[in-house]
Image (cartoon, rainbow, N blue to C red):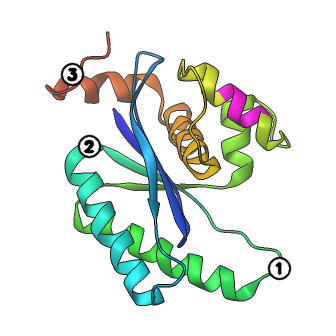
Amino acid sequence: MVILGIDPGYAIVGYGAICFSLNKYKTLAYGAIETEATDLFEKRIEKIYNDMIYIINKLKPDVLSIEKLYFQNNQKTAINVAQARGVILLSARLSSVPIYEYTPLQVKTAVTGYGKAKKQQVMEMTKRLLCLKKMPRLDDTADALAIAICHAQAAGSNFTYDMIKRRKDINVL
């Protein structure tokens, strides 16, 4: 199963694609969609949409996993992130990619086994689980990979084995 993990935002959208089969992970791609702070907001979400469509078409994920939003303070930021997140969800929906949402608590628990894990602990376990030599430059990208791992843990291995047998473009074993 190819999972595209997304850490939503409007300045930076982190993405990470992994293949998960028979309890093994393979990192396929990761990076970030970055928008210019000086651009109009409409132009920023247009870039996010266009880049998401490109990423989905290139990686052909079986599912998209995305972090649910939660904000404590800045309502303006929350509204803008929610709008960008809507564009991300729309790009997946229009590409017929099923969407799964996870809270930060679910992601931390899936990756580290502890729902109150610190960011550095989540990043270290993500690095270990995916056998990465070093973590990606941006935290948003590392978070996206952790979100993808979360879905892999939630989906179950029988489902992934059946799905991977139908995919001819992935070689995990």
Q: Residue 59, relative to residue 87: is it above or below?
A: above
Q: Which residue is mark 1?
A: 73
Residue located at (59% from left, 39% from top): 146
The residue labelled by disc 2 is 59
Residue 70 at x, y = what percent? Answer: 71, 69
The image position of residue 166, as x and y in percent, is 17, 28
Mark 2 neighbour class, 10 Å CA radius: few under 14, some 14 to 19, many 20 or more? some
Q: Residue at x 74, y 49 (%)?
A: 105
Q: Identify the amino acid type marked 2.
A: Leu
Q: In which quadrant of the rendered image does the C terminus lie?
A: top left
Label 3 or label 2, whichever comes before in sequence order: 2
Q: Residues within 10 Å of mark 3 (few under 14, many from 20)?
A: few
Q: Is residue 121 above or below residue 170?
A: below
**CA distance for labels 3 and 1:** 46 Å
> Residue at the front extreme?
38
Label 2: element kind:
helix
Which region of the structure is painted magenta? 121-125
Q: Amino acid at mark 3?
A: Lys
Q: Nearer the viewer, residue 75 or 168?
A: 75
State which mark lies toward you, 3 or 2: 2
Q: Nearest to the eye among marks 3 and 1: give it.
A: 1
Which mark is on residue 165? Answer: 3
Q: Is residue 60 visible?
A: no
Label 3–label 1 contact, CB within 8 A: no
Which residue occupies 56% across, 20% down? 133
- Amino acid under disc 1: Asn
Count up the numbered dots: 3
